Amino acid sequence: RKVKKPVLILSSRTPNKASVRERIKELEENGAKVVLKETDISVESQVTELIRGVREEYGCINGIIHCAGVIRDNYIKKKSVEELGEVFAPKVRGVAYLDQASKEEALDFFILFSSGSGVLGNPGQADYAAANAYMDVYTEHRNELIAKEQRQGRTLTINWPLWKEGGMQVSKATEKLMQGKGLEVLDTIKGLHAFYQAWVSNCSQVVIVEGDALELRRQLLIQGEGNTGNEEQMHDKTEETEDVDNRMLENKVQKAT
């Protein structure tokens, strides 16, 4: 379903960034009305006021997309309590506060932008992986509330890879390391297509992966074998299971669906 002249409420702790204004201009040129609201979704009172204000001004809220996140990459033994809190806040408290504040709304959707790290983990991102895994589990919790008629609007969590033009970027060295594992950054056009596919899938959780499919399968097979066996054995196993490893990959990265 497509709508004409949608009203988009964008909330952020820093809504007046130049990059944000540029994107807003693009949206408005395509017919959307865009309203910026300065909000910290890890603060319950601000989230409650945001939802209340939007409802009073526009009459209803049709859907919510949560895409906030903070990274403080480092090995967990070197992280401070403050850094852990900064990473957890928008994902853990933010999702819970948004859901609670909107529980009476007749939503069409409640979509959470999670990360592939929540499923597969990532060195230096134990806290970020845990925060995203929380979002994935919360999706199941909220869909259970829908079944009990305590919420409205299908809940979907999408575990995204790194976006080429996204707000979170990595160094060239990290990108090269990703490529060595068969991973590639996701471009915007493919990302939008993946978003639509995720929605029509009717799954509660969808993992998006961009890269060399054969190498990704091999990497997951190695992990599944506990890193046992040599490279040649792993290569042979990948070839032998070519007809079934699609299902194996799906089971590996979409356990929660």
Image: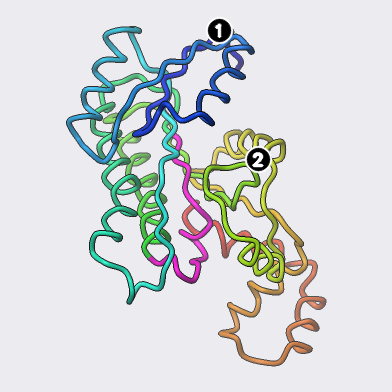
Q: Along the polypeptide, which appears first: circle 1 or circle 2?
A: 1
Q: Is residue 151 left or right of residue 109?
A: left
10 Å crowding of disc 2: few (<14), some (14-19), many (20+): some
| Residue sitting at x 33%, y 45% | 90
x and y percent of residue 159 in the render? 52, 50
x and y percent of residue 69 in the render? 41, 46
Q: Which amino acid is tagged 2?
A: Gly
37 and 45: which one is in front?
A: 37
**Quarter of the figure that contains the N terminus:** top right
10 Å crowding of disc 1: few (<14), some (14-19), many (20+): few
162 and 18: which one is in front?
A: 18
Which range of residues does the magenta coloring cover? 111-126
| Residue sitting at x 68%, y 70% | 181
Q: Is residue 137 left or right of residue 162?
A: left
- Looking at the picture, does residue 116 appear above or below residue 97? below
- Residue pushed farthest left? 45
x and y percent of residue 257 in the render? 50, 51
Residue indicated by mark 1: 5
Query: Which secondary structure, mark 1?
Result: loop
Residue indicated by mark 2: 191
